[in-house]
Image (cartoon, rainbow, N blue to C red):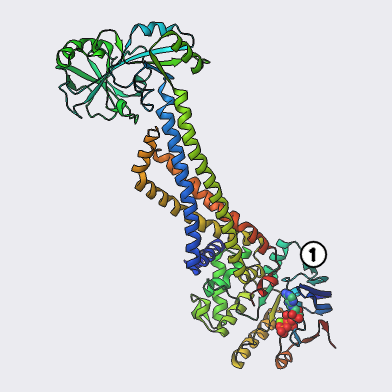
Amino acid sequence: MASRSGFRFLLGSLALQNLGRRKPRTFLLLAAVAICSGAIFTGAVLMRSIETSMSVGFTRLGADMLIVPAGALTNITAALLTAEPTDLTLDDSIVGRLQHLKGVQKVAPQLIFRTDASGYSRGGDLIDLIAFDPDSDITVQPWLEQHLDRPIREGDVIVGGRREETLGSEMLIFGRPLTVYGKLAKTAVGSHERGLFITFATLAALRDPMRQICGMKAPLEPNKLSGVLLELAPGATTQQVRFAALANFPGIKVVSAESMLTSIRQGLGALLDGVLGLMIIMFVSTALMVSVMFSAIITERRRELGLLKAIGARRTQIIGMLLAEAGLATAIGGVLGCLLGIVLMRIYEHSLVYYLDRMGVPFVWLDGRVISIIAVVCVAFAALIGAAGALYPAWRASRSDPYDLIRAEI
Amino acid sequence: MLACADVAKTYATERGPVEAVKGVDLTIDRGNFAAIIGRSGSGKSSLLAMVGGLSRPSRGSVSIDNTDIWRLSDNQLAQFRNRHMGFVFQFASLLPTLRIIDNVALPALLGRARVPADAYEAATQLLNQFGIGGYADAFPAEISAGEQRRAVIARALINNPVILLADEPTSDLDEETEREIMDHFHAINRSRGMTLVMVTHNLSLAEQADQVVHIAEGRLAA
Ligand SMILES: Nc1ncnc2c1ncn2[C@@H]1O[C@H](COP(=O)(O)OP(=O)(O)OP(=O)(O)O)[C@@H](O)[C@H]1O
Ligand SMILES: [Mg+2]
């Protein structure tokens, strides 16, 4: 084995052994780099997660606006997927009239009926029946993850992403059998995830037994809607459409994606700016610290470097060896940091998700592939910090005369 | 042939410039054994470092076999040192984290003129020749100063240099070891026709040389 170890191997082991020679110092260096890259890794993963959460939660949904009765509560997370179940209703004649409003492209009516009297109790007694129109729908079918191999029809039900019914199975709702036609992907919006989605035709067929069991509730009157989701024409502004809608239809409330997003973005923006600033400060201070540390390390090793030069090591070899050593040390620190970050995120996942939920952001973790890419980039950055920090001291040492390097320690 | 023309070295210090070597002209014929003697601080080590391509002269030139070494580029000079020169320093100069065998093979590996297997083969031969073959896998701290010195000499010889420069190579060793090392030097000097330049305080050692260079206060003394 010894006879096969070449020059590169020897320089490599010189670098490694030098790190091992000063264990407390190496530990300190690794710890500092680990903390820095752990913070950067965690920050980056969280930032990207929040970004994707926002785009999943809002942008992809298709609805730009929601029109509900004036007194209705709206949950801003859920608003662009469904209206909230209330007894307040709109008359369905609004659909045709909204269609003629300038700037409106699609009008998707929904009726939501929350009940604990359906007779179906798998996954809880309380269910949200959400009626939608398959032809104009913009927020239900885009989320269909799996469905039977045929178009949806009367008597079908689509279940939310967190429900456990299997495709094709039967559900008895108000005594009527419904076929599970499809299942939605997880959206992280509660009412959407637990809801049962049916067409207006299916709702009409259920109306009689519902009235018998629940009595004559407002949403069960014919021609009523809980809300209308709008998609705007390209170029139309929410401002225009909001004004037009409010002017034409008294007693409504308009919730637009823009106002929600801006308020959330403002909150998150401040948070993310802070994280970014912190990351930059950590990066710079770690690079400086590594540089100072390597100045000391290199000063301490001047004789060794002088000897290497004396026996014929070239400047580039000296610099290469020192940079490799520094880069290796900080890359190890980077790996430790990423592991630390993953552990921390696992530990604090619950409080984090809760906090973000309260800010109106449904939290969606990045997938493993993106997280590993971020980790690899972090480790590369850590190695770069080390190499950059060691560059100047290494360059200075490499240009000294071997005799000066050798004498320095005497 | 080794020729110095008016080499001088001035060190910049905080107390002002120190003129350690003040213009030395010197020729040493190929295959000769030259001893540099002089009082402490007279500039012997500084002169040797300039001759060996380790310390750039403030003025003057050094040529070895018609190569003006201080006109070479940094990389060329590094290669020249590697191929044609061997050094034995006064202090322990093995890399502490490498085994003896690695230390000795290092110049051959650095030069890349030989494949690693050949370098290690040559290193093993030299260690055996110097009677420390049993310590090949030891680390420098695990062997005595005299044994270390022999390992350094083995390292200096691994690339078959044309010139060997030694700075007080035996100053801190007992007489027995000193004599052994001097015998090695004489043997190498004779058998390989290698020029040997050695700094020493020891006049009895200097008497064994073909040529004695006496330095006083940075100048050649008569
Ligand atoms: N790097 C340096 N910086 C400043 N002054 C130096 C340096 N190297 C040597 N000197 C000075 O130059 C003079 C000659 O030093 P040098 O080491 O060449 O002497 P020397 O003859 O080898 O002495 P010794 O026999 O004690 O080893 C001394 O006065 C020394 O202080
Ligand atoms: Mg000296």
Where in the figure is residue A26, as x and y percent of width and height?
50, 64
Q: Between A404 and A41, which is closer to the camera in this rendering?
A: A41
A103 versus B91 height, above or below: above
Residue B113 can be seen in this image? no
* Residue where numbered disc 1 is placed: B71
A180 versus A11 height, above or below: above
Provide the chain ID for the residue under circle 1: B
Where in the figure is residue B69, as x and y percent of width and height?
77, 68
Quadrant holding the C terminus of chain A: bottom right
Q: What residue type is labelled 1?
A: Arg
Q: Between A220 and B116, which is closer to the camera in this rendering?
A: A220
Dot 1: within a 10 Å radius of its alpha carbon, few (fewer than 14), some, or many (20 or more) residues? few
Task: Classify residue A286 as left or right of residue B166.
Answer: left
Task: Classify residue A371 as left or right of residue A123.
Answer: right
Query: Which image quarter: residue B161?
Result: bottom right
Where in the figure is residue B174, as x and y percent of width and height?
60, 91
Task: Classify residue B55 as left or right of residue A34.
Answer: right
Where in the figure is residue A40, as x and y percent of width and height?
49, 47
Q: Between A85 and A235, which is closer to the camera in this rendering?
A: A85
Residue pictured at 51% horizontal, 60% vertical: A29
The kind of secondary structure element at disc 1 is: helix
Q: Is ligand 1 closer than 8 angstroms to the Cβ of mark 1?
A: no
B90 versus A366 height, above or below: below
Residue pictured at 66% horizontal, 59% vertical: A395
Residue B98 can be seen in this image? yes
Q: Between A67 and B121, which is closer to the camera in this rendering?
A: A67
Query: Which image quarter: residue A405?
Result: bottom right
Task: Classify residue B222 as left or right of residue A164.
Answer: right
Give the quarter the ligand 2 occupies: bottom right
